[in-house]
């Protein structure tokens, strides 16, 4: 029996080679295979069947990786959920994805129990302990992977939408395997590579781009719970590669420990998820001698383009289409248009949402990313803006509509507009512009604290500006560009 993704993830790693080093806790590929088998048996004993969704709102840990791989091995569908999501947000995801099992921190069981619907709840804490770990410890370390084809679902990743409602992107075994295989070759990952893994693992970047690419190469990763410049620099002498969002690079540049010597063992620094400023690219080169490789992707597609490994890595561009992936800009050559993508990396549609799926694909099968781009004479793509109203803060997407809906529901608020303003650390910061009812005693603190129970903290406005009215165009549409100019 073959399990399309699982078999490929374990094909290259030698059983005695280290795959994860998490603060001294090292696991070989053989250890990982046995741990995953135990979890696969545990999940099965909890009644999880092929095709069922396994929701994971779990802190980053080795156990969380084991859970992901076990879900794939039993033919179920992994549903990673940001640990910052509030119960209000979780209610929506659980209602929409209908997981058979929810894995969460022990402290969250009381909050999740009333909203879990038919799902069973089992625990896993930040150190990898909990009900699921206990159950797995008593299970066999052998498990025959459930057969899965390239077209079978491997994961559902929620991504917010311009309408304010998140949509579940359905990613297949073929989507994930093809993308990791391509990146491994393009970025020259081998068994000798050691990736510094400091990204969260509830998003495509840290979960699939990082982990799958490393495993496909039989390489290893140093696993850190979150990004911390000190901790990253401390392990750099024994690492070869880093994947990060631009904030990683600006924070490293702010650290006096970032030098040529500190980065001497490294062969590759990769950036993505948000635009990397040309200035950051240049400063990093000047300080370390390394040229950051920027790439471009999306939850729905995984990675689409990358600057080359050999050849010019050009600041301000996201490089060339990946081998096997087609990218086009819906505009005459050299002009700005919406970026569209086609290839084995492109998702299978939005979970239980055929209308949304239909709306975001062209009749000839191209996926409409909503990003605005331009292709230069050498074929390099630059992302020059967004056709969608989206803020990217520290690599995390925030859709203004979702925040505006919550703001508008607050007593004392007539209407609101949420915009992204340049921020030195996060790239963009979420800013709320609010029109209050005359006489309302609202202030910034009251507004932010009212949103706290509804929205994950990274979505909360960093600043609330009160205005008498919002600028509108002749169509009655709020002129956000004008607001950005005024308050930027
Ligand atoms: C944390 N906070 C944030 C963010 N992160 N606020 C805005 N934007 C953020 N990204 C808030 C916290 O809620 C907290 O607020 C305060 O800032 C400090 O939190 P802390 O945890 O200390 O922050 P941090 O650890 O320094 O995190 C910043 C970070 C992190 C390192 C930039 O957000 C991060 O790792 N981002 C990467 C996200 C990512 O993986 N994106 C890939 C998506 P309070 O004090 O009020 O509690 S996948 C994708 O986009 C596609 C596929 C692609 O192309 O990769
Ligand atoms: P997500 O929906 O979280 O997967 O975020 C995907 C979005 O992040 C894309 O549609 C782009 O708008 C943005 N993005 C990702 N990588 C880059 C990059 N290198 N430069 C500019 N924008 C990027």
Image (spheres, helix red, strand yellow):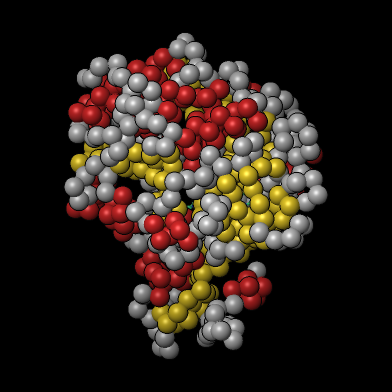
The residue shown at (30%, 41%) is: 53
Q: Quadrant of the C terminus?
A: bottom right
The residue shown at (72%, 25%) is: 264
Horizontal side of residue 244 vs 318, given as left or right: left
Q: How many marks do you count on the picture? A: 0
Residue 68 visible in the picture: yes
Residue 409 locus on image (x, y percent): 36, 74
Horizontal side of residue 220 vs 154, given as left or right: right
The residue shown at (53%, 51%) is: 365
Q: Where is 28 relative to 62, above or below?
A: above
The residue shown at (38%, 23%) is: 2
Q: Farthest residue toward the bottom?
A: 438
In the rendered image, which quarter is residue 431 located in? bottom right
Q: Where is 375 relative to 475, above or below?
A: above
Residue 231 visible in the picture: no
Relative to the observer, which residue lies in front, 419 or 462?
Answer: 419
Relative to the observer, which residue lies in front, 455 or 444?
Answer: 455
Q: Farthest residue toward the top?
A: 16
Q: Quadrant of the N terminus?
A: top left
Residue 86 locus on image (x, y percent): 34, 55
Residue 251 locus on image (x, y percent): 63, 44
Horizontal side of residue 69 vs 385, given as left or right: left
Residue 73 locus on image (x, y percent): 35, 27
């Amino acid at each position: 029996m073959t399990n399309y993704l699982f078999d490929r993830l374990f094909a290259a790693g030698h059983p005695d080679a280290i795959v994860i080093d998490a603060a001294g806790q090292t696991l070989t590929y053989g250890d990982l295979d046995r741990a995953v088998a135990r979890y696969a048996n545990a999940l099965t004993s909890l009644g999880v069947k092929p095709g069922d969704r396994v929701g994971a709102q779990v802190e980053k840990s080795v156990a969380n990786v084991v859970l992901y791989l076990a879900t794939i091995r039993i033919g179920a569908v992994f549903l990673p959920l940001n640990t910052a999501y509030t119960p209000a947000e979780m209610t929506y995801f659980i209602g929409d994805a209908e997981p058979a099992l929810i894995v969460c921190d022990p402290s969250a069981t009381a909050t999740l129990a009333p909203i879990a619907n038919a799902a069973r709840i089992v625990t896993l804490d930040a150190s990898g302990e909990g009900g699921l770990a206990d159950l797995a410890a008593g299970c066999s370390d052998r498990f025959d992977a459930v057969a899965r084809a390239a077209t079978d679902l491997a994961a559902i990743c929620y991504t917010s939408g311009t309408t304010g409602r998140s949509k579940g992107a359905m990613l297949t075994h073929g989507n994930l395997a093809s993308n990791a295989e391509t990146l491994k070759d393009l970025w020259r990952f081998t068994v000798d590579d050691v990736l510094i893994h400091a990204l969260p693992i509830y998003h495509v970047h840290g979960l699939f781009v990082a982990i799958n690419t490393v495993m496909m190469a039989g390489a290893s990763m140093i696993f850190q719970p979150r990004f911390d410049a000190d901790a990253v620099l401390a392990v750099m002498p024994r690492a070869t590669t880093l994947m990060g969002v631009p904030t990683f690079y600006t924070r490293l540049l702010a650290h006096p420990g970032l030098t040529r010597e500190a980065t001497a063992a490294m062969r590759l620094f990769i950036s993505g998820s948000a635009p990397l400023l040309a200035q950051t690219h240049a400063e990093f080169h000047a300080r370390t001698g390394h040229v950051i490789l920027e790439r471009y992707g999306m939850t729905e597609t995984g990675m689409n383009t990358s600057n080359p490994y050999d050849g010019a890595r050009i600041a301000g561009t996201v490089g060339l289409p990946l081998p096997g992936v087609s990218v086009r800009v819906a505009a005459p050559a050299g002009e700005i248009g919406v970026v569209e993508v086609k290839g084995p990396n492109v998702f299978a549609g939005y979970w239980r949402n055929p209308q949304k799926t239909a709306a975001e694909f062209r009749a000839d099968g191209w996926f409409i990313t909503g990003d605005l781009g331009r292709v230069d004479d050498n074929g390099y793509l630059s992302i020059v803006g967004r056709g969608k109203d989206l803020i990217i803060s520290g690599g995390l997407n925030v859709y203004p509509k979702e925040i505006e809906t919550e703001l508008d529901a607050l007593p004392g608020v007539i209407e609101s507009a949420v915009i992204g303003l340049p921020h030195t650390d996060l790239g963009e910061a979420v800013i709320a512009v609010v029109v209050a009812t005359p006489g309302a005693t609202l202030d910034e603190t009251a507004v932010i604290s009212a949103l706290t129970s509804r929205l994950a903290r990274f979505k909360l406005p960093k600043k609330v500006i009160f205005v008498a009215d919002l600028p509108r165009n002749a169509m009655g549409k709020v002129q956000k560009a004008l607001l950005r100019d005024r308050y930027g």
